[in-house]
Image (cartoon, helix red, strand yellow):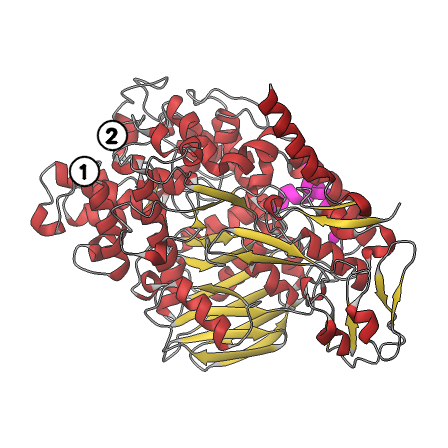
Amino acid sequence: MAWTRQILRVNLTNGTCTPEPLNMQWAFDYLGSRGLASKYLVEEIDPRVDPLSPANKLIMSTGPLTGTMASTGGRYTVVTKGPLTGAIACSNSGGFFGAEMKFAGWDMLIFEGRSPKPVYLYLENDRAELRDAAHLWGKSTWHTEETIKSQHQDPQIRISSIGPAGENQVLYACIVNDLHRAAGRSGVGAVMGSKNLKAVAIRGTKGFGGIRDFPEFLKVTTEKKQILADNAVTGQGLPKYGTQVLMNVINEIGALPTRNHRDVQFEEAGKISGEAMHEPRASDGKPQLVTNAACFGCTIACGRISKIDETHFSVVNKPEYWGASGGLEYEAAWALGAANGVGDLEALQYANLVCNETGMDPISFGATVGAAMELYELGILTDAQIGIAAPFGSAQTLVTLAEMTAKGEGFGRELGQGSKRLCTKFGRPDLSMTVKGQEFPAYDSRGIQGMGLAYATSNRGACHLRGYTVASEVLGIPFKTDPLVTEGKAGLVKAFQDATSVFDASGLCIFTSFAWGLADIQPQIQAACEGDWSLDRLNLVGERIWNMEKQFNLAAGLTKKDDDLPPRLKTEPAKTGPAKGLVNGLDVMLPEYYELRGWDAQGVPRPETLSRLGL
Amino acid sequence: MQKSLSIDPVKCTGCLQCEMACSYTHTQSINPSKSRIKVFSFEHEGRKVPYTCTQCSDAWCMHACPVDAIKLDAATGAKVVLEATCVGCKVCTIACPFGTINYMSDLGKVQKCDLCDGDPACAKACPTAAITYVDADWTGLERMRVWAQRANAAAL
């Protein structure tokens, strides 16, 4: 119950699609989605494989609460070995694709090998076919969705696809579903591209009836939805401003990384904030924001749907961009904006649209542009090399580089490799604002100390979605801690990481955790799933998932030196704001964290830890 | 008092809780493909619009049915398909101007909104009150209230 108990194995080399039963022992040990897909990956691939080789696998997985009326129960996760980091990559996405997979009768899809030519998987309930995608190759994710729907004469198909960025193996290419949602980080789209898999198109009409106790499930999910509705963040802030509610807040506390982390406050933050998206524009009298939107089953509805200013330089004579579309979300607005010193809201939305349609992670793309702009200002990169002047703050440059990177043109090829490879190539690896090769998201760890540890120890490289201690350190959820100190942060980070693993494995959205704790999702899982799902067991599942990912990374060749921050964050103090004078205290927090995790001084899980977790 | 479903698309976020609730109520399974209310997404305009049967007084589907398989539920005003009687001829689906009665190939029958015997699951499940179940004679009441408030504010 709560699993369909069926997975589909797609061998792209041989062109075969083979159903097999879900390993239920693994489902009981790893729950679903992130946890279960990672277990399959760990069991099935050599951790040392080249991520872009046929020996790597790409797994798409739902969780037990995906495709149910539990609020936000629509998520699916993509797990593979990541080309940007060489670590385990795990990106989840909302939209409607995950629920459709469940309704078609599948918990998980495993893609292996490499197709000799571009294909897409068409999945209609039990019917699975690999179809020719020659006519889709080179096309945007938007065009791909439209074409597949019209070709099958079925507007109700749900689709995940890659754009040109994934095909060109931009190392931070993402997989886009339902036009505006994405499994965004760590380059999962590049892996899909390396397999010549353009898209997965699903139509599910079987539905899902596998809920252990339906009356109880309806009762408890209804109660828990009320908690989300009554909460200031999930009931008001997120629906009204989306994640962009954070832009001014994070800037004020001096933790908005600006100009490749040279600064921690952006003087134009207000112009690119959630509030600014509500303000009528001078040109047409309309605000950029059209409406908020929900993913499947979500009663928060934080998604932003906006219309770009038709008179903006980026879209003049490009009516294909004038319709309503996804964005801006906070991370994208930050990475395309503050990280480059660009304060032009419309330019950010255009760059964001380019990322959506071509399938690029706007966080890594924007942050890589930030690194390039710093190299340019230092005179290391020139106009001739880049093909355009690239000073911080240039909206024109941002827009041009977005187009070039997606198409793999000129200097765009360098940008498509991410900031670590870019900065290393030009002799300044220290200027790459990354962990394990993945670019930071929108929180400066000098102003939010716990995030430094969360970034350094995140199993998929720098990331805010593996242990979002911002909730505690800034928003006071579930309790307030001081963002400027390192004391207590090791325990806080561990607790957030383990709990987040469970949220991700359940099929729910981590944004519910602004209002819910594990104790709120436990009864929902218990009502849906067979077996005894106590809070203790869920805590153990979360810790098990974390340690399993860590084990994979160690086997892939990562070491303690990969659990580190760039020197800038540890040696260059914040220049302004409440954190003025502070650097990140990672070196204080890390040993305590390893100890709390039951790992040795090198960050290797001790035998007794592994045995306690059943690993 | 007879009631009717009232839909305010501006409030709809497209979460599909209504489709899940409808399908569960009628099939004991979560299956939006079996929902009798559908949410349409107009991507270019950024709008979501739930749509279902309006329960016409002089219902085309009811008149068209050659075997009298569609009956009026006098208590709710719903036009209800009697599954045991329906022969799956689909004439009602042709007669309905709005497309809100549809043939289900797996059942060999048609299905449409039956107002859940007067307690519609979609309205209960909607988190934003985009779908409400209101006095059938006063479906415009809320809109009137909004305009009355505006008129009053202008007068102040």
**Magenta stretch?**
A519-541
- Is disc 1 in contact with disc 2, using a CB cutoff of under 8 Å? yes
The disc, 1 or 2, on the residue closer to the chain's N-terminal end is 2
Q: Chain of mark 2?
A: A
Does residue A103 show up?
yes
Q: Which mark is residue A262?
A: 2
Residue at 90% of width from left, 60% of height from top?
B73
Q: How would you classify the magenta stretch by its main secondary structure?
A: helix
Q: Amino acid at mark 2?
A: Arg
Question: Magenta stretch: residue A602 in it?
Answer: no
Question: Magenta stretch: residue A538 in it?
Answer: yes
Of all residues, the one furthest to the front in this rendering is B155
As drawn, B40 above or below A127: above
- Tell me the quarter of the picture where residue A375 sits: top left
Q: In front here: A79 or A515?
A: A515
Measure how far apart labels 1 and 2 are at the Cα level.
Answer: 9 Å
SS class, disc 2: loop
Residue under label 1: A374
